[in-house]
Image: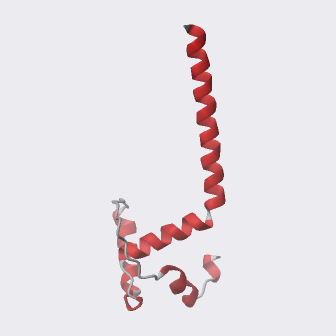
Amino acid sequence: MNSKNISREQYTETFCKDKRIRNRQVLYVSSEIHEEIRKVASILRKEHITTSSLVDTILEHHLEIHKDLLNSLYQERQEQFLAEFTHRHKANEESE
């Protein structure tokens, strides 16, 4: 979804979901971002959206859109970690 070409209807369909967040976790954001998100949520109140559900939906959308890239980065980091672990483990065995 290209943000420059998204219609109001597409935006509200994608991000204005009334979500019940049952297993809540704390997530810190800057006061500037918090204020902007609060403003957006207040504009969208008629769609019955809360600040928390808006942020949750935005993050869910981001993770879905970028999942292939994120999975690739995660896999690279895992492989790098395992290679470093194997190297350290062999070095320790050789020094014993």
- The structure residue drawn at horizontal position 40% and vertical position 75%, both measured from the top left corner, is 53
Total labels drawn: 0
Name which quarter of the figure residue 88 lies in. top right
Image coords of residue 42 (percent x, y): 36, 84
Name which quarter of the figure residue 62 lies in. bottom right
- The structure residue drawn at horizontal position 62% and vertical position 62%, both measured from the top left corner, is 66
Query: How are the colours assigned in the image?
Result: secondary structure
- In the picture, the quarter occupied by the N terminus is bottom right
* Vertical side of 4 occupied by 71: above or below: above
Image coords of residue 3 (percent x, y): 60, 77
- The structure residue drawn at horizontal position 65% and vertical position 76%, both measured from the top left corner, is 2
- In the picture, the quarter occupied by the C terminus is top right
Image coords of residue 90 (percent x, y): 61, 18
**The one of 3 and 91 positioned closer to us in this rendering:** 91
**The one of 2 and 62 positioned closer to us in this rendering:** 62
Name which quarter of the figure residue 35 lies in. bottom left
Horizontal side of residue 57 vs 67, given as left or right: left
* Vertical side of 77 occupied by 65: above or below: below
* Vertical side of 21 occupied by 67: above or below: above
* Vertical side of 71 occupied by 49: above or below: below
Image coords of residue 23 (percent x, y): 35, 65
